[in-house]
Amino acid sequence: MLEPIFLEPVFKDRIWGGSKLNQLYGYNIPTPLTGECWGVSAHPNGQSTVKNGPYAGLSLGDLFRQHPELFLSDSSTFPLLIKILDASDDLSVQVHPDDFYANEHENGEQGKTECWYVLESEPGAEIIYGHRASSREQLSQMIDQGEWDQLLCRVQVNAGDFFYVPSGTIHAIGKGIVVLETQQSSDTTYRVYDYDRRDPEGNLRELHLDKAINVTNIPHQESKLQYLTLSQDDAEITTLVSNDFFHVQKWRIAGKAALDSNPKFTICTVISGNGELIVEEHIYALQHGDHFILPANFGHYELCGHLELIVSWK
């Protein structure tokens, strides 16, 4: 019998981080400035570790390489990275390259297209999503002159909002927001503006303006999404985005739902509530903050309880 693969996250200290990852999900965070939980990651800069079963103790990257039958992936490396971010302060204004640019300029790294599901938002909290420049020359000029209010587009957000952020999109998560981020497995970020903040040594944080200007989509294009919701037993399944980079859904379970797995592996994060995953006679307890993978061809299973999950695959 295939078992679900539960994962131990990796945590990242960030200048804009805080303590909500502990308050909301009970994570044992390393510092009071913990900004990121890498819940499902095989990226060399921080790998999740298997918590249960015959592969306990293996990094996700090693598991992916040593047991490809569990994933049946078309990718040579584990393709996705799932994070929970606590923006207790504003993140830097940034942009990410696409696959072609990153492969050429970042030693073969993947590009970074991502999406955000807003888990918590303080009243009036905002993200930066897009810009108003009409040409690369205007973008460069407005950056040089620090015309941030004129350049950057701000959007108020609420818990439950969803944003698709393709590579080349200027963006930033604002203070008071917690998001679950599904992204390509990449750690390449080009900073455009960082509010003149300094690192612990007193140095201004590095910007990457030439690369950022090169990769920014001009003009900015709004991503128009159409959500599709289907009901099955006591499950409500909403497709948030589906494309060549990833498929992302929100599952709401209120009772008991009998489900069948994808032919490929499926990533699950419990974002609220508690319940159980039942496979034949085996019962696995689920609580908010759990990250797990259902292996390829996992087969029939049941989800029971009152819980919400963000589910993804590629």
Image: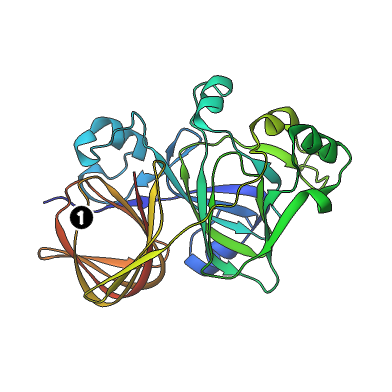
Which sits in the foreground, 278 or 29? 278
Is 228 displayed left or right of 180 in the figure?
Answer: left
- Residue 131 percent coordinates (x, y): 72, 48
Instruction: Check the image and name the residue furthest to the right.
Output: 145
* Residue 274 falls in image quadrant: bottom left
Q: Quadrant of residue 88?
A: bottom right
Image quarter (top left, top right, bottom left or bottom right) of the C terminus: top left
Please say if 164 is above or below 98. Answer: below
Q: Which residue is mark 1?
A: 261
Q: Residue at x 66, y 51 (%)?
A: 172
Residue occupying image coordinates x 70% and y 71%: 124
What kind of residue is marked 1? Answer: Ser
Image location of residue 260, percent across then percent down: 17, 59
User: What colouring style does the render use?
Assistant: rainbow
Quick one: SS at disc 1?
A: loop
Tell me if residue 198 comes above or below residue 305 in the rendering: above
| Disc 1: CA contacts within 10 A as few (<14), some (14-19) or many (>=20) | some
* Residue 84 visible to the viewer: yes
Q: Residue at x 20, y 47 (%)?
A: 263
- Residue 44, position as x, y percentages in the image: 46, 32
The image shows residue 299 at horizontal and vertical percentages of: 14, 54
Q: Nearer the viewer, residue 303 or 229?
A: 229
Q: What residue is drawn where x is 68% and y is 74%? A: 123
Q: Looking at this view, is 75 or 169 the one in front?
A: 169
Left or right: residue 148 compared with residue 6:
right
Residue 306, compared with residue 32, is above or below; it is below
Say whether residue 89 is visible: no
The total of numbered circles placed on residues is: 1
Left or right: residue 121 compared with residue 89? left
